[in-house]
Amino acid sequence: MRYLTAGESHGPQLTAIIEGLPSQMNLTTEVVNHELKRRQGGHGRGRRMQIEKDTVDITSGVRHGKTLGSPVALVVNNDDWKHWTKVMGIEPLSEDINPEDIKRQISRPRPGHADLVGGMKYGHRDLRNVLERSSARETTVRVAVGAVAKQFLKELGINVVAHVVEIGGVKADSEKYAGKSVGSIREIVEEDPVYCLDPEASKQMVAAIDEAKEKGDSIGGVVEVIIEGCPPGIGSYVHYDRKLDGKLARAMLSINAFKGVEFGLGFEMARKFGSEVHDEIMYDEENGYSRRTNRLGGLEGGMTTGMPIVVRGVMKPIPTLYKPLQSVDIETKEPFKASIERSDSCAVPAASVVAEHVIAWEIATAIAEQFHSDQMPQLKEEIEAYRRYVKGY
């Protein structure tokens, strides 16, 4: 399976085309819209979330609630487009309009953003041409794509959830959620203002976000994605580019502002002995193979072990600040404060939703590569046969 997205932050719409989905898979707009709403939530979001009420239109590839096997097109319209039609218009400018007179041009790049380097790479003097596409607004349609992937996985008995484990130095107590199922985690997360499982830490996170907002600053954090029900052996050790943990790491780091990724114990492994890191193998006839612990996060040798997959991503503070850092005007070369665009003081809760969906997509594509997937009923049969095989191996 593969997909491609298109669209600018203040353009008329965001679009994705998904190719390779099996036929006869259940899919409705309600499934996608629920996830889009979650992405817009979380304490710390900016004014843009009050303007856009993201909903999806499925314009091809689905008939009467079932996929056809043909490409699925997803469209999310930008409600704010009506205020940007002249600034972001598609048609060439008329001869009586000077391009330099177009409003909202940007010549002062923001530190930490794609503005300056993107302008250099593509030769843009108006840096709006860069920030419109590099904006995290594009993750809206990636969540829509991931929602389709989650539906694909759900029909195979695989479930995905994400939650926030740290914001601004405030860490959730992992003992508060150890051993919880994906379903129970989701119930708690969807009712929490910062999508955190630790209620005490959640209160402190909200306070940290409010403090950053008052200062005109931003804060980052850490999110965790858990995948439950994935059979062992998904991925491969044979080639470097088929290792599933490599694909998951790439997906996590492809999210705007993400700068680090780890699995299981992650970087803490560097401070432990091997006996404190590796997961002992057990077997019983009823359940087949399992691990005594899950310190490696459900992955060995680039493949799933059958244990829950646990992957975390580190998000830096958003670079658009209401007390902007120093920059340089690319036209005058004079020092100035960087340009200000509408922004969030903290987008970590929303980023956890994005992480959940990009990881879901990678798991779904890995399964589609490994098993026959033209028709959903056939794929279900193959997966069940494979589960029986590995259980008795």
Image: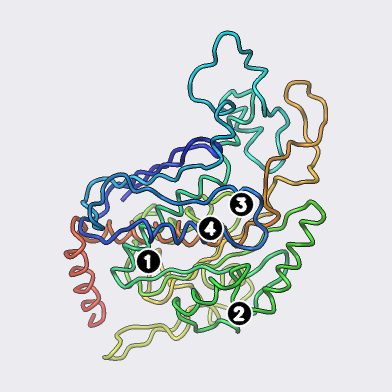
**Residue picked out by circle 4:** 39
Mark 1 surroundings: few (<14), some (14-19) or many (≥20) residues within 10 A: many
Q: Nearer the viewer, mark 4 or mark 3?
A: 3
Residue in the image at 63% along x and 67% along y? 194
**Residue picked out by circle 2:** 174
User: Mark 1 or mark 4: which comes first in sequence?
Assistant: 4
Snapshot quadrant of residue 270: bottom right
Q: How far apart are labels 4 and 3 at the CA level?
A: 13 Å
Reply above or below: 163 against 173. above
User: Mark 3 or mark 1: which comes first in sequence?
Assistant: 3
Residue 303, numbered label: 1
User: Mark 3 or mark 2: which comes first in sequence?
Assistant: 3
Reply above or below: 72 against 6. below
**Residue picked out by circle 3:** 50
Residue type (three-letter) at the residue carrying disc 1: Met
Snapshot quadrant of residue 289: bottom left
